[in-house]
Structure formats: structure tokens, C-alpha cells
């Protein structure tokens, strides 16, 4: 079982995205790469992952050591405990953003247009068995 | 963590008198017909100083909000008063938001965009359906894409909603029918939303009770003051419910059908029995519970009662007959089916469903609702 935000986990997640017909349809016009950030709840360093999403597919995904080297169109960040709740379905992704548990940077017009794709992306994380 | 928010609601006979407490310049946002029909006069006679923007159209666009904001910048109102159906109220909300946040691009407002408002906003519905006076949503049309976009944000909520039955006395029966069905769709959708909660469930039940009891009466006789007032209150209650729990699948379908420019309430209301039958595979427990509170046996009887109510409003129970009434042929429906399915699958209401239907299921839903067939998939 891959550890959350390990290269193996990202690989499994990218595979799940690329196998999803629902995502392909919902995001068929989407062009925008993401930097995902997991902030520690207490001490420690943040974790970073990059996924390039393009026209309903994930073109690549990898763990990022130095986020300053990444210039992604979107950034989605939150604390580890909130990520856990998100992946377990205990936090609705949009409610999570509204209530400040997660922060999103990037073109909001694009995100609003692809709200369904965003939800499918979160749902797909449940397909990846995760060690915390 | 979640929240329930509400404007201060002034309701019942003479509630328009509440306007007399406001000093300063008011900008009225409304449409030409209400102005000509002297419905707006009932509001302006309570105000000291005012100006009127009356260019709100049916299915208002982002552009009309821009025009109204320019009007507001010239007039510099102390407060804004939306008078009308959902269209005027949504435009008034948009005007206040952009007037107070000049740098904001309305199309890019998300539920989590941080916005502040200082100009007081008062909304006065002249129809009993949209619930816009009590919700934190704005629905505007993007003309170049021919689709409606819903923007939701806490700062969109009005400060006051004046729900005075006097304002709906002259509402034509047909409008009362489709706006009432819109309210029913709000209340039922919100009861089965993924965001449903303890603070809206009771409101949904009460709104449904009032609509099942009084909508037919208010439709048949606009002089039935009790029925008219109860339906007016029900619409605001249902608006409160969707503010916290959101609309659902009947609106996913209804928004999409707006490409044919049919009344929104008819589109959502007629979709309702079919969306309930389909969505029961995810939410049967909730529908059964709602049916119980309304005195019905189960979800099946709920669907039957909704169809009975729709018929009692001299309204068809399928899209084929509805579209025919608006001169939309079967060929036009079928030619646009791909667009209908695509728009529905991209509608923002879909993300607060317990489960997102596949495009194939959405396509079938349109066809079944068009033919008037019970959903069996």
C-alpha cells in the first residue's frame, strides 16, 4: 500500500485519473497543472506533488522536492488532517474551500466551470489505497 | 463545519412599511413590466429618495449587471432595493456585490472568494418561487455560451428580505404555477442534497407542506389571501433551504433546458418526478422520510402527488407537451439533446448531489421526462 504523497501514490493516482471515463468527459477542455501541498498539522515540512492535467488526462505526476521550481497554474493546499478527511469523504471539497480548510490559487472562473471534474478528481483519490 | 445564514426576513401583511425606516438614496433594481404595472410604486411610495434601474431582462446576463453597476456608480445609492422575480433580485445581488467590490469579476466569484459588502441590500420578491431573496446565490446567463452560471458566496446574501403578500396579489396565475413549482423543486432538492443538514430539513418539510396545501388554491384564485400568503412564505423558506443545502438534480435538468427559454419553474417542476424516481437509488430513505412528513406513504406516492399537483396547475407532466406549448418541436429537442446533456453534466448543481449521474443516465432522464415515462434505470 503506497504511502500518501509518495511517488508510488502519485503514480497510482495518475493511473486512476487516466482510467476514469467520468473524469475524461468532465475535464475534456481543461488545461491546467496543479501543485498540491500537504501542510503538517504541527511540526515538520510540507509535502508537495505536481500533476499536469490536460484535456481529461493526467500527462504526468511526480513528488516535488523544491516547490520554487514549479510554476503551476493552480495550487491546492491544506493540513494533513484535513487531507485525510477529504480522502475519507468526511469533508466535501467545496465545503472545505468555503470553510477555509483548504486554499486554492489559480483562475477561479476555470475552476467554477469544471466543478464536476474537481469533484471527480477528489473521488478518484479513494481508488488509491493509502498508508498514512 | 458548515453554516446556515439568512437575511432578516420581514413577512406578512404591511411588511413593506419596514422600508420607512431607511434614510438616504435607494437604487431600485427591477424590470420594465413591473414598473409599468405600478408594482414598483408600492415600494417607492415608502421611500424618500430613489432612482430606478429597470433594464433587467428574463434570464439576466452578466452584461445587465455591468450596466446596472454603472448606473449605481453614477447615482451613488446608500442602499439597493431589488424588486421583482428571481431575475431582478439576482441582478440586485450582483450589483451590490460589484458596487462594493469594484475589482471583482462576477464570473470568477467562487463560494470561497473573500468579499466584503457595506451597502445594505433589501430584496422584495414579486413572485413566489425563486427564493432568491433568502439565498446566497446569483444565477446569471453567459450569453456567448448560452448557459446559466450560478455563483454562490456568503457576501451575496441580502441584509433584508421583505416578503409581503401585497407584492404578489397581481401575479398572473400561470406565473404563480411555474414559480410555485420552482419553490417545490428547491425544497425537495435541498432535502436530498449531499449538503442537507438539520437546519434546513425542517424548513424543506414546512415549505413542501405549504405548497401541497396552498399552491393549487393560490393558482386557482389569486384573491385567496391566505393561500397566496402561504405560498409566498413557502418560496422564501425553500430559498433559505437551498442557501445552505443547495438545489439538486431537478435544477441540473431545469437549468440545462433553459436553452429553449421556457419558464425555469416549469422546467424544474416537470423534471422533479423523474429526477426523484432516478435519484431514489441514492436517496430513497430521505424521500421516504419526506413523504412521511407530508402524510404520504413513501417516495412512490410522493411522485404521484407531485404529478397530481402539476396537473392541478393545468401544466403538463412531461417535456414533450411543455415544449410543444412553447413551439419547440421534437426534432429541435433531439437536435439539442447533446447540448442539454453536456450543459446538465457541467451544471454546478451536480456537485452537491449524493452521487453524480453519468452522462448516459442524464441523457435517459431527458428522454424519459420528455416522453413522460416512469424511470426504470
Image (spheres, helix red, strand yellow):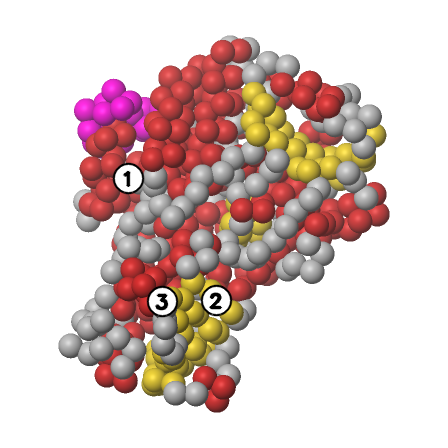
* Residue at the farthest front position: A43
Rendered location of residue B8, percent (x, y): 57, 30
Which numbered tag is attached to residue B276?
1
**Distance (Cα) linking label 1 and label 2:** 34 Å
User: Please, is residue A52 above or below residue A116 in the view?
Assistant: below
Would residue B69 be found to the left or right of residue A35 on screen?
right
**Distance (Cα) linking label 1 and label 3:** 42 Å
* Residue at the farthest left position: A1
Say whether mark 2 and mark 3 are on the same chain: yes
Asked whether A15 or B185 is in front, the reply is A15
Q: Residue at x 45, y 25 (%)?
A: B234
Would residue B22 be found to the left or right of residue A35 on screen?
right
Q: Is residue A1 visible?
A: yes
**Distance (Cα) linking label 3 and label 2:** 18 Å
Along the polypeptide, which appears first: circle 3 or circle 2? Answer: 3
Asked whether B356 or A6 is in front, the reply is A6
The tally of labels here is 3
Would residue B260 be found to the left or right of residue A61 on screen?
right
Chain ID, mark 1: B
Name the chief secondary structure element in magenta.
helix
Number of other residues with Cα within 10 Å of mark 2, as a class: few under 14, some 14 to 19, many 20 or more: some
**Magenta region, residue range:** B292-309
Chain ID, mark 3: A
Q: Residue at x 40, y 74 (%)?
A: A37
Say whether mark 2 and mark 1 are on the same chain: no
Q: Which residue matches tag 3?
A: A41
Q: Tell me the element at label 3.
A: loop
Asked whether B20 or B151 is in front, the reply is B20
Q: Residue at x 25, y 36 (%)?
A: B286
Q: Which residue matches tag 2?
A: A104
Rendered location of residue B249, percent (x, y): 35, 46
Say if the magenta span includes residue B279: no
Amino acid at each position: 500500500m503506497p504511502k500518501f504523497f509518495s511517488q508510488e501514490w502519485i503514480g497510482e493516482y495518475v493511473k486512476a485519473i487516466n482510467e476514469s471515463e467520468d473524469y475524461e468527459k468532465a475535464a475534456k477542455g481543461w488545461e491546467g497543472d496543479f501543485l498540491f501541498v500537504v501542510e503538517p498539522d504541527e511540526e515538520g515540512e510540507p509535502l508537495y506533488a505536481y500533476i499536469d492535467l490536460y484535456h481529461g488526462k493526467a500527462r504526468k505526476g511526480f513528488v516535488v522536492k523544491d516547490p520554487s521550481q514549479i510554476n503551476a497554474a493552480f495550487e491546492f493546499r491544506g493540513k494533513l488532517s484535513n487531507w485525510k478527511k477529504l480522502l475519507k469523504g468526511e469533508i466535501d471539497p467545496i465545503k472545505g474551500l468555503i470553510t477555509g480548510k483548504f486554499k486554492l490559487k489559480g483562475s477561479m472562473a476555470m475552476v467554477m466551470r469544471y466543478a464536476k471534474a474537481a469533484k471527480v478528481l477528489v473521488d478518484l483519490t479513494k481508488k488509491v489505497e493509502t498508508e498514512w | 463545519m458548515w453554516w446556515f445564514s439568512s437575511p432578516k426576513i420581514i413577512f406578512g401583511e404591511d411588511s413593506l412599511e419596514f422600508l420607512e425606516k431607511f434614510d438616504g438614496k435607494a437604487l431600485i433594481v427591477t424590470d420594465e413590466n413591473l414598473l409599468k404595472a405600478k408594482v414598483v410604486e408600492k415600494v417607492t411610495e415608502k421611500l424618500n429618495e430613489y432612482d430606478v434601474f429597470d433594464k433587467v431582462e428574463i434570464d439576466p446576463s452578466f452584461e445587465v449587471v455591468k450596466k446596472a453597476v454603472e448606473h449605481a456608480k453614477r447615482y451613488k445609492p446608500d442602499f439597493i432595493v431589488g424588486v421583482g422575480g428571481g431575475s431582478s433580485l439576482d441582478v440586485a445581488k450582483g450589483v451590490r456585490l460589484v458596487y462594493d467590490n469594484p475589482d471583482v469579476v462576477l464570473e470568477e466569484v467562487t463560494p470561497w472568494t473573500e468579499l466584503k459588502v457595506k451597502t445594505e441590500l433589501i430584496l422584495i420578491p414579486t413572485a413566489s418561487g425563486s427564493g432568491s431573496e433568502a439565498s446566497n446565490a446569483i444565477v446569471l446567463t453567459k450569453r456567448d455560451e448560452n448557459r446559466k452560471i450560478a455563483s454562490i458566496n456568503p457576501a451575496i446574501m441580502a441584509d433584508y428580505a421583505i416578503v409581503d403578500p401585497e407584492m404578489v396579489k397581481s401575479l398572473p396565475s400561470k406565473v404563480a404555477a411555474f414559480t410555485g413549482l420552482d419553490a417545490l423543486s428547491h425544497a425537495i432538492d435541498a432535502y436530498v442534497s449531499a449538503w442537507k443538514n438539520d437546519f434546513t430539513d425542517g424548513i424543506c418539510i414546512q415549505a413542501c407542506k405549504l405548497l401541497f396545501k396552498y399552491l393549487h388554491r393560490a393558482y386557482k384564485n389569486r384573491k385567496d389571501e391566505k393561500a397566496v400568503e402561504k405560498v409566498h412564505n413557502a418560496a422564501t423558506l425553500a430559498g433559505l433551504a437551498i442557501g445552505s443545502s443547495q438545489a439538486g438534480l431537478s435544477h441540473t435538468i431545469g437549468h440545462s433546458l433553459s436553452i429553449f427559454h421556457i419558464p425555469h419553474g416549469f422546467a424544474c417542476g416537470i423534471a422533479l418526478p423523474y429526477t426523484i424516481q432516478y435519484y431514489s437509488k441514492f436517496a430513497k430513505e430521505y424521500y421516504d422520510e419526506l413523504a412521511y412528513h407530508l402524510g404520504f406513504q413513501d417516495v412512490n406516492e410522493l411522485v404521484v402527488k407531485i404529478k397530481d399537483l402539476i396537473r392541478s396547475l393545468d401544466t403538463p407532466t412531461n417535456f414533450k407537451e411543455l415544449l410543444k406549448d412553447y413551439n419547440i418541436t421534437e426534432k429541435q429537442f433531439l437536435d439539442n439533446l447533446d447540448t442539454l446533456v453536456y450543459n446538465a453534466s457541467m451544471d454546478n448543481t451536480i456537485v452537491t448531489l449524493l452521487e453524480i449521474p453519468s452522462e448516459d443516465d442524464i441523457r435517459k432522464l431527458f428522454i424519459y421526462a420528455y416522453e413522460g415515462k416512469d424511470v426504470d434505470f
